[in-house]
């Protein structure tokens, strides 16, 4: 058998530090590598595989649709596209959908939509205010919106029209707003930037400000959407409605699909304004429809609330026992554990040695974003491994 990871390191671009293992199969919250080693997966394809690996509902939708129609031109409607759009609209506060292929593409399209809206409603304003420690994707415009200098610096200069302000600071948004501002772009819970929760009133204050100023409020729910935080969309928990929302990740449960949703008033694209060859293709939409239907029919958000509460209380128990754990935070099944020292790399490696896959979020924090259908027993299994890993790391460092 070829050494896939050696071949991979020769042929693939070097964009991330990969571990020398090659995954070949998944089932539920388990993965298997090419050596037959079994792993417990608490990363879930980066908060993507909401129904777990190889879920029968996804496999059935994929195979059924693959035999019917995988791609048609943008000239025509296709059935799964319309069905998924209807399902999303009927279960959200938004009215219209544009399908695309990745989170970054959705956010970039949402910003184009806001610029288009501002052409007629705000005298051609074009600037987007977004938050420090946000994450919105890897295209040039979404990197500019992403308020983390490490993603921007290698590619300077950034495109014009983006301002990054501290999260949870309404005054900073007010100060940054000028007559050139067209939109505020925020994650309802910041994912990649640290699993940072909004303070009690923040999103409502932003909503009010956007209403007063005529700004488009774009919520990036690429990571939080489709049940991840315990409601179908995270905005539901904060008493605000976005004007425009982006989805990806969980929407396809592992099949690439993304979407921009907008209220009628903000759906200002006209033919020719925007497009995407694969956007809304029947295969992706059939899978998306199967995923969202399953999530709704089986009250997956309710399960996320229950299991997430259990997960959080297990992590808080650990915090009681290990003073090096400085914080446990998150919502639903988007959780982070922060340390008072930079031990996240070591903890991640020690978990991997024990066949648990976790995300090293920051030098001093790890993140958990498993499949939404994970059971309490599987959570316990993983948390026990995290505890053992942490004990090993601390023992090595002499505490
Ligand atoms: C909130 C948010 N927006 C956008 C993106 C970019 O999504 P993608 O990697 O599919 O382009 C991510 C990815 O992690 C994300 O978490």
Image (spheres, rainbow, N blue to C red):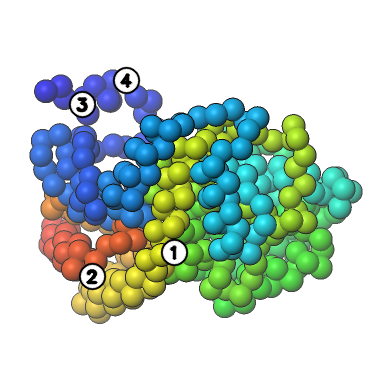
Mark 1 vs mark 4: give the one in front. Answer: 1
Looking at the image, is mark 1 or mark 2 nearer the viewer? 1
Label 3 and label 4: CA atoms lie apart by: 10 Å
Is residue 42 found left or right of 199 in the rendered image?
A: left
Q: x%, y% of residue 293?
A: 44, 57
Crowdedness of circle 1 by 10 Å Cα count: few (<14), some, many (20+)? some
Q: Quadrant of residue 378?
A: bottom left
Secondary structure of the residue carrying tag 3 is helix
Q: CA distance from mark 2 to mark 4?
A: 40 Å
Foreground tag (2 vs 4): 2
Q: Position of residue 56 (x, y in %)?
A: 28, 49
**Whether residue 358 is situated above or below residue 175 in the rendered picture:** above
Q: Secondary structure at mark 1?
A: helix
Q: Residue at x 15, y 34 (%)?
A: 34
Q: Residues within 10 Å of mark 3 (few under 14, many from 20)?
A: some
Residue assigned mark 3: 4
Task: Point out the tag, 1 or 2, that comes first from the N-terminus.
Answer: 1
Q: Earlier in the sequence, mark 2 or mark 4?
A: 4
* Whole-percent x, y for residue 297 in the image: 41, 65
User: Mark 3–mark 4 contact, CB under 8 Å?
Assistant: no
Q: In the rendered structure, are the residues bearing label 2 and label 3 in contact, judged by CB atoms less than 8 Å apart?
A: no
Work out whether mark 3 precedes mark 4 in sequence or the reverse, and give the earlier one.
Answer: 3
Q: Could you give the CA–CA distance between mark 1 and mark 2, rounded to whole angstroms?
A: 20 Å
Which residue does the numbered mark 2 point to in the structure image?
Answer: 376
- Quadrant (top left/top right/bottom left/bottom right) for the N terminus: top left
Q: CA distance from mark 2 to mark 3?
A: 34 Å
Question: Residue placed at 23% from the left, 70% from the top?
Answer: 376
Q: Which residue is mark 1?
A: 296
């Amino acid at each position: 058998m070829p050494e896939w990871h050696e071949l991979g390191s020769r042929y693939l671009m070097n964009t991330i530090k990969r571990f020398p293992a090659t995954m070949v199969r998944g089932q539920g919250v388990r993965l298997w590598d090419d050596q037959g080693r079994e792993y417990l997966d608490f990363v879930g394809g980066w908060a993507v595989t909401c129904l777990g690996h190889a879920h029968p509902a996804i496999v059935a939708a994929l195979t059924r649709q693959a035999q019917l129609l995988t791609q048609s031109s943008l000239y025509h409607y296709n059935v799964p596209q319309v069905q998924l759009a209807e399902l999303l609209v009927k279960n959200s506060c938004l009215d219209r959908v544009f399908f695309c292929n990745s989170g970054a593409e959705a956010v970039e399209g949402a910003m184009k939509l806001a610029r288009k809206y501002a052409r007629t409603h705000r005298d051609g304003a074009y600037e987007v205010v977004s938050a420090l420690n946000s994450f919105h994707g890897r295209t040039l415009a979404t990197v500019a919106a992403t308020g983390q200098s490490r993603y921007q610096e290698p590619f300077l200069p950034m495109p014009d029209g983006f301002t990054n302000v501290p999260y949870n600071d309404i005054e900073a948004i007010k100060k940054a707003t000028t007559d050139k501002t067209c939109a505020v772009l925020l994650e309802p819970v910041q994912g990649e930037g640290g699993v940072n929760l909004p303070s009690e009133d923040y999103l409502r204050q932003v909503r009010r400000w956007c209403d007063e100023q005529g700004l488009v409020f774009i919520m990036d729910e690429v990571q939080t959407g489709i049940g991840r935080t315990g409601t179908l969309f995270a905005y539901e928990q904060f008493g605000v409605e976005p004007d425009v929302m982006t989805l990806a990740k969980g929407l396809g449960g592992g099949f690439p699909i993304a979407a921009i949703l907008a209220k009628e008033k903000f759906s200002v694209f006209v033919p020719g304004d925007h497009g995407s060859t694969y956007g809304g293709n029947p295969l992706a939409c059939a899978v998306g429809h199967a995923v969202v239907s399953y999530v709704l029919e089986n009250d997956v958000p309710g399960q996320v609330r229950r299991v997430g509460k259990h997960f959080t209380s297990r992590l808080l128990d650990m915090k009681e026992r290990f003073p090096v754990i400085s914080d446990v935070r998150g919502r639903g099944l988007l959780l982070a554990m922060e340390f008072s020292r930079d031990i996240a790399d070591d903890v991640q490696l020690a978990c991997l040695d024990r066949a648990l896959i976790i995300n090293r979020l920051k030098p001093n924090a790890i993140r958990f974003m498993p499949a939404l259908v994970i059971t309490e027993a599987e959570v316990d299994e993983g948390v026990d491994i995290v505890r053992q890993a942490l004990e090993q790391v601390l023992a090595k460092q002499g505490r």
